[in-house]
Amino acid sequence: MSTTQRPVVIGISGASGSVIARAVVEALLARDAPVALVCSNDARLVWQEELDEPFSQALARWREHPGFTYHAIGDMKAPIASGTFPTAGMAVVPCSMATVAAIANGLANNLLLRAADVTLKEQRRLVIVPRETPLSAIHLENLLKLARLGVVVMPPEPAFYLRPKGIEEIVDFTVGRILVALGVQEGLEQGQQYRRRTE
């Protein structure tokens, strides 16, 4: 099985940033990259608060794509819970500090955490998009521990030098960076590149 045929595991945890999670899944499916999705119960609640589209409706749309699979948070028999199941890596987007702490300390009591644990032990790409501010020393220590393990820690920082016109452009830039970190695309696409100000 080639890397392009292996699914990218996307975990959605209960932090703010549901719009980024939705955009990442849709960007991957638009590239015909298989996606295996797992979403925490708290993430569903946050999604309901932040987006007009219900999670169930988004899920129904994604399920129309032949490369999409969804696994319940408690399904510890899902293929992504095992290191023998080949994947192209994983992104946790958004990633709450509770999820950061659990991954950093090897806790795996649900499928999202187990999939991240498997990604680490199999030395596959793991990207986390942490959402919290300000960060305490505990948060920073956990993030540092993950970074030292090779995890890409990618806070969704706006590229103000691109002069984004709204949330959509900020999300688009962040999604592009996530896809590059996952190895799905080689560089930022048109409209996402770094630009130097000439003024």
Image (cartoon, helix red, strand yellow):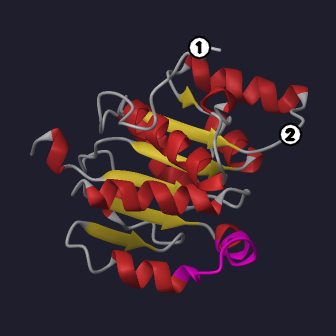
Residue depicted at 73% across the width and 29% down the height: 142
What's the CA distance linking mark 1 and mark 2?
32 Å
Amino acid bearing label 2: Thr
Residue depicted at 54% across the width and 58% down the height: 21
Mark nearer the N terminus (1 vs 2): 2
Amino acid bearing label 1: Thr
**Looking at the picture, how far across and down is residue 20, in whole percent?**
57, 55
Residue depicted at 51% across the width and 85% down the height: 56
For residue 64, say whether it is visible.
yes
Q: How many marks?
A: 2
Q: CB of mark 1 within 8 Å of CB of mark 2?
A: no
> For the magenta stretch, what is the residue range?
44-55
Image height of 21 relative to 60, above or below: above
Q: Secondary structure at mark 1?
A: loop
Residue that carries the numbered disc 2 in the rendered image: 133
Residue that carries the numbered disc 1 in the rendered image: 198
Query: Residue 50: within the magenta?
Result: yes
- Name which quarter of the figure residue 47 lies in: bottom right
**Looking at the picture, how far across and down is residue 166, in whole percent?**
66, 52
Q: Is residue 53 left or right of residue 71?
A: right
Q: Quadrant of the C terminus?
A: top right
